[in-house]
């Protein structure tokens, strides 16, 4: 048996290839839309990808199951659990086999057993793997978004992102039952999760790639809750904001993603085309780094620097999937990688892109400020400090008297802000604050600055407060 691990840092997403050396067959679990890494790995190992599967209808990236099956001729195994709202629309395709709890199939000498593990989503399944060539007991479990290192999958995404009201508590109670089911499994089982630290599919995911069930029983908070009600309260408390694009991902993955070979090739447009797009109210994202954008950029563009692993998620927060998307590249080339990133979260309507040479005329700057200068200016003038971090970050500590609007909601809530005030955006590192400032500037706010330093600086120069209730002495 061969096991290969693939990890996308930009999405904090893990996928796996399991191969049988004896027969040359291979299974890929939870593939991403860019299937090239799996094809290369299979070729290197002398394997044929004959089976493809996924643990659930993903909400944070476009599944590569259809793409990989179309490329290799593999059979797709999909969950048939959950109610009618969570059935795959392409389940009737000739290369799809539906599976339920207790079902199994073989990849050469490798046996794959299906476990229904609802909670994160109603249809979620996990895959227990046994290498029958050398053992009669399972080696480990691909747990997808059910069980992570140090955490379990959040149950509120259907309600918070997809609009299925009243489902998060039901999901939390299902998650409790799934955890209880795993309490009875052997401690030695390896756990291969679908995400790592940085994913919004949980609230405290660990950064190591795998774990054992015994270790999770000892240290994962999900296994420490003694009652179902305690578990539900713990699981629902403190979950991060659900990215708005998750609803789009659910829709795309349920219906079946388009094959990338059927998508049009973007065009390298000139400055005249860029001006026309902006004049028409189009959305253009400048992917250059913070320093480059703050020094000079085309008015109306929004800065989401591609030099951060998390930039794809921020694009997902901000993009309008119903309209064409244009990007300004961070360099003179690199359009293929950027296009792969966009397509990984379903940004398929990309008519074209722009090279940095379009910046040769009619540009503007985005003013930035240090924490020390901000503190000095606040003594002399009225400034609105806008905190664009998440709620849990703001509650932990924030600049006193600051206004709080998380970055992902800023476009929808910009009308809450005064047009005539000097607005200074800030976050934990300066990255999100620049995105927020550029968004406001593009929306017509003329007095905007970005605090370009992180928490270690602003907490030193500016008064801070906490949203937590103060503890009273016993």
Image: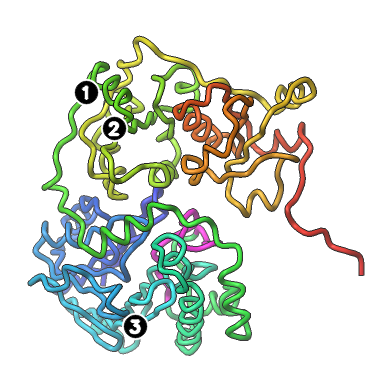
Whether the magenta-drawn stretch holds residue 317 is answered as no
Q: Indicate the quadrant where residue 127 lies.
A: bottom left
Residue at the spot of label 1: 269
**What secondary structure is the magenta-colored segment mainly?**
loop
**10 is higher (above) or lower (below) than 99:** above
Q: Which residues are magenta?
A: 190-207
Residue at image x 38%, y 46%? 316
Residue at the spot of label 3: 115
Count how many numbered circles sit on residues in the image. 3
Residue that sits furthest to the right in the current view: 474
Residue at image x 47%, y 73%? 166
Residue at image x 52%, y 21%? 366
Whether the magenta-drawn stretch holds residue 193 is answered as yes
User: Percent position (x, y) of residue 411?
Assistant: 47, 40
Quarter of the image where the N terminus is located: bottom left
168 or 34, nearer to the observer = 168
User: Percent position (x, y) of residue 28?
Assistant: 24, 65
Quarter of the image where the C terminus is located: bottom right
Q: Indicate the quadrant where residue 124 lies.
A: bottom left
Q: CA distance from mark 3 to mark 2?
A: 42 Å
10 Å neighbourhood of mark 1: few (<14), some, or many (≥20)? Answer: some
Residue at the spot of label 2: 326
10 Å neighbourhood of mark 3: few (<14), some, or many (≥20)? Answer: many
**226 is higher (above) or lower (below) than 237:** below
Decide if residue 111 is on the left or right side of residue 237: left
Q: CA distance from mark 2 to mark 1?
A: 10 Å
User: Percent position (x, y) of residue 121?
Assistant: 39, 72
Q: Indicate the quadrant where residue 113 lies.
A: bottom left
């Amino acid at each position: 048996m061969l096991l290969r691990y693939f990890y996308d840092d930009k999405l904090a997403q893990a996928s796996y290839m399991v191969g049988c050396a004896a027969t040359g067959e291979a299974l890929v679990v939870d593939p991403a839309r860019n299937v090239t890494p799996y094809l290369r790995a299979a070729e290197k190992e002398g394997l044929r990808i004959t089976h493809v599967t996924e643990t659930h209808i993903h909400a944070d990236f476009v599944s590569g199951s259809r793409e990989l099956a179309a490329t290799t001729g593999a059979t797709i195994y999909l969950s048939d659990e959950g109610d009618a709202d969570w059935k795959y629309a392409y389940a009737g395709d000739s290369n799809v086999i539906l599976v339920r709890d207790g079902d199994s199939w073989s990849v050469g000498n490798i046996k794959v057993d299906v476990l229904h593990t609802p909670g994160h989503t109603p249809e979620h399944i996990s895959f227990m793997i046994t290498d029958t060539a050398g053992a009669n007991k399972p080696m480990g479990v691909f747990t997808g978004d059910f069980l992570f290192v140090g955490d379990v999958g959040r149950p509120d995404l259907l309600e918070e992102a997809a609009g299925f009201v009243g489902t998060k508590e039901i999901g939390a109670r299902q998650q409790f039952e799934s955890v209880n089911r795993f309490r009875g499994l052997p401690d030695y089982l390896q756990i291969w999760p679908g995400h790592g630290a940085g994913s919004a599919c949980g609230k405290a995911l660990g950064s190591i790639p795998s774990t054992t069930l015994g270790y999770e029983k000892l240290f994962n908070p999900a296994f420490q809750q003694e009652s179902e009600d305690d578990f539900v309260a713990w699981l629902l408390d403190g979950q991060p904001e659900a990215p708005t694009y998750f609803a789009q991902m659910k829709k795309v993955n349920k219906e079946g993603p388009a094959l990338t070979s059927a998508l049009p090739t973007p065009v390298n447009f000139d400055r005249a085309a860029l001006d026309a797009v902006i004049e028409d109210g189009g959305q253009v994202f400048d992917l250059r780094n913070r320093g480059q954008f703050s020094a000079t950029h085309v008015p109306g563009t929004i800065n989401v620097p591609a030099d951060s692993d998390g930039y794809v998620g921020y694009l997902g927060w901000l993009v309008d999937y119903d309209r064409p998307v244009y990007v300004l590249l961070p360099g003179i080339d690199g359009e293929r990688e950027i296009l792969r990133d966009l397509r990984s979260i379903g940004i398929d309507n990309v008519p074209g892109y722009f090279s940095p040479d379009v910046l040769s005329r009619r540009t503007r700057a985005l003013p930035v400020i240090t924490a020390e200068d901000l503190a000095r200016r606040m003594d002399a003038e009225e400034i609105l400090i806008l905190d664009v971090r998440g709620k849990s970050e703001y509650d932990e500590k924030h600049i006193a008297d600051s206004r709080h609007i998380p970055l992902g909601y800023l476009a929808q809530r910009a009308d809450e802000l005064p047009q005539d005030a000097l607005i200074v955006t800030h976050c934990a590192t300066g990255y999100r604050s620049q995105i927020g400032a550029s968004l406001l500037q593009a929306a017509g706010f003329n007095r905007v600055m970005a605090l370009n330093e992180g928490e270690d600086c602003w907490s030193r120069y500016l008064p801070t407060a906490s949203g937590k209730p103060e503890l009273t002495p016993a």
